[in-house]
Amino acid sequence: MKILCSGIEYNIEIRGEGEALVLLHGFTGSAENWDYPSRFFSENLKLIAIDIIGHGKTESPTDLSRYSMVRVVEDLKLIFDTLNIGKAAILGYSMGGRLALSFAALYPEYINSLILESASPGLNNEQERDVRTKSDWKLAEFIEGKGMEAFVDYWSHIPLFQSQLLLSKEEQESIKKQRLNNTKHGLANSLRGMGTGAQASWWNTLKTLSFRVLLITGSLDKKFCKLAAEMNELLTAGVWVIIENAGHAVHVEQPEEFGHIVSDFLADGKV
């Protein structure tokens, strides 16, 4: 279905009945990324998968200000209100995890529980943010200058996704095809507007979250395992699970185990 949020048409895929679980994909992804891993979720869930602005079938405006994390959080709130979701669990992967945490920090009254897969609360100091912002803008210019084919080929081979090269050729081709369905200006503006360097830091907010938070990382993703360890120290109701033989995209590389862990957490908080 489509929902208009401040002039931007969002694409949302909904299926199932039960407790609402909002699904937020990562950078270069789309709502369809959840199709396969969600087969291993509990059947007693209402899945609400959203194409984030600049991705999938949601519009990709040229106005850079529409991509700021705060504006996208407001879009997400409007989607919650329009669908009468009330309180829900949110599962966010990478960029989607940063959006989920930003939403939870600003609107905690909408949250039952939070599941963050390979996600960061942002960067702690101005210098780190400046360095990351320059890096994100440089990558955005690469996307616009070289085009989608060159970018997707580059993106598929960065160290963060090295473990995905162990997937079958069919799976790798499916991931590539989905990434290519995005537009170069949508991805470029997403990097500039809601990249890690552009968003606020939520490190100090972690200790104030009263709802349950599940952190999921892959054992091969050392960077985000370190981040998750630091995040878990600050959470009052946090659980951290490391899934073996998985890198950054745990739901892609170990979908069955991922699905069972998510379902167990939503059912009773235990994993």
Image: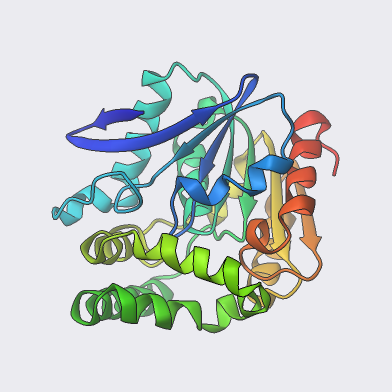
Q: Nearer the viewer, residue 18 or 72?
A: 18
Residue occupying the point 49% across, 47% down: 32
Between residue 258 and residue 115, name the one nearer to us: 258
User: Can residue 28 be seen from the camera position used here?
Assistant: no
Name the image quarter holding the C terminus.
Answer: top right
Residue positioned most to the front = 170
Horizontally, residue 210 falls left or right of residue 149, namely right
User: Residue 127, how many percent across, how many down?
Assistant: 39, 77
Is residue 94 shown left or right of residue 249?
left
Name the outermost residue toward the right: 270
Residue 21 visible, this orientation: yes
Q: Position of residue 143 (x, y in %)?
A: 27, 75
Residue plotted at (62% across, 48% down): 36
Count of number-bearing discs: 0
**Residue in the picture at 81% in, 67% down:** 244
Q: Is residue 185 above or below residue 43?
A: below
Depth check: give the residue in front, 106 or 57.
57
Image location (x, y in percent) of residue 151:
34, 78
Q: Is residue 254 above or below residue 25?
A: below
x%, y% of residue 131? Answer: 37, 80
Residue furthest left as drawn: 63
Q: Quadrant of residue 224?
A: bottom right
The residue depicted at 72 percent of the width and 75 percent of the height is 220
Up the image or down, 173 lies above or below 22; here it is below
What is the quadrant of residue 83 in the picture? top left
Above or below, comparing residue 44 to residue 101 in the picture:
above
Q: Nearer the viewer, residue 252 or 74?
A: 252
Quadrant containing the N terminus in the rendered view: top left
